[in-house]
Amino acid sequence: MQLTSRQVVTQFAHMLQEELFPLLQSSVGPLNGQMQLLASVISLAPLGRMLYARRASTGRPSKDRAALATAFLAKAVLNLPTTRGLISRLRVDEALRRFCGWSSLQALPHESKFSRAFAEFADTELPQQLHEAVIATTQNQRLIGHIARDSTAIPARERFPETTQQKKQKKKQQKKKKKKQQQKKQQKAKQRATKQCKRTRSKGSFGKAKAAQSGTRIQRQRHQKLAGMLSELPRQCDIGAKKNSHGNLQYWRGYKLHLDVADGQVPISAVLTSASVHDSQVAIPLMTLTSQRVVHLYELMDSAYDADAIHAHSRQLNHVPIIAPHGRRGTTRPSQLPKVFPDRPTPQLSPAQQNRYKERTMSERVNARLKDEFGASHLRVRGAAKVMAHLMFGVLALTVDQWMRMGKTD
């Protein structure tokens, strides 16, 4: 007999309450809510199997990797801002220290070892793999109704000053562009005619490979594999801008985290890009990644994702896209247009689509919880790999927390 998602959550929670928590309390002492969440994450994530697969066959074996990974999970669960604060907490909190795997205060590693281990986890993408394994365990047999897609700003303490060589290269490129623009205008008419003939003749894999190298980024993504899509997305630290609820632009320096959230506020997929990357550039990679992990029906997105290629790719994956129409699809300023063109109002969602679109707010609640409760607002590392590892430890803890809540609310 196949169990439903609610029965699986209830069965797992019963096992924690009846077997695991009493055993831990007898060894480390009373467990509060955060320690129970940490125990739930450790019991779901295959930490030992992931770390054992990376162990080298020769040389001195690395010690305390499981304990260090557990400590970084505790840092996200306890919402501690720095690694130094985590070490200070481990020194005074005997229950947390023994839970991570250090029996005495003398066995606690130095701060430099924490830093080296975190760099290793970031390079091997350990948090991302743990999150993927948890999603496969908890959401594999579940039919998800809605996937809400959105991004959130991740401010970082990094500098990106331009060197003199980069400035000189930009000036040279601008001069070359001005010279080539005149030549391109003359050749465009001839190239369009030849391209139309080639596109009609090109079929099969050759045509797909050629289409994957031409066009805009969104058009190329429709013919690329997932690895190729993600490799083209910039990940360096830069300046980003986003409109707030009042319509004003807000600027920040750092990155942007793109999330796909399922019903129940469960994060399914996450992609980190530069702060300047537009949300629409990550829609096709995210929906492709999410489709490989779970089965869902509707995809909810705001007006920033309103592009024909995104609509078409979502339907190609057998999903129903519900995207808020952008103002550019209608006549925003009819007084400035010639009288020959009639006014064209912006298309609106149907009443049924509007009811489903209300579920998109769950992505904003997930972003708020990730920043307020799981350390996303305390970013003290540099580099895209380490930033993603820091955020994914929080996403992993948030995923397990929301999955456990589903058993109480369903």
Image: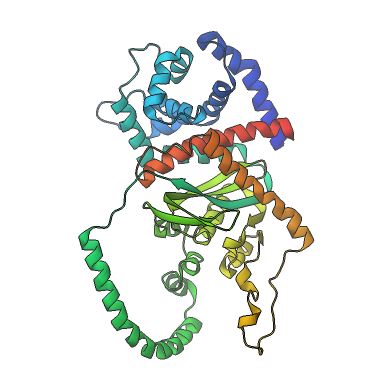
Q: Residue at x 28, y 54 (%)?
A: 161
Between 62 and 239, the residue placed more toward the observer is 239
Between 390 and 243, the residue placed more toward the observer is 243
Q: Residue at x 43, y 73 (%)?
A: 214
Above-or-below relation of 160 to 409: below
| In the image, farthest residue toward the right | 351
User: Residue 217: where, in percent of width, then height?
Assistant: 46, 66
> What colouring style does the render use?
rainbow
Locate residue 403 relative to residue 221 in the image: left or right. right
Quadrant where the C terminus sits is top right
Residue 62 in view, yes or no:
no
Q: Quadrant of residue 316?
A: bottom right
Residue 276 in view, yes or no:
yes
Above-or-below relation of 72 to 328: above
Between 122 and 306, the residue placed more toward the observer is 306
User: Residue 141: where, in percent of width, then height?
Assistant: 65, 41
User: Residue 199: where, in percent of width, then height?
Assistant: 48, 81
Quadrant where the N terminus sits is top right
Q: Quadrant of residue 228?
A: bottom left
Q: Residue at x 58, y 22 (%)?
A: 36
User: Residue 100: where, in percent of width, then height?
Assistant: 44, 20
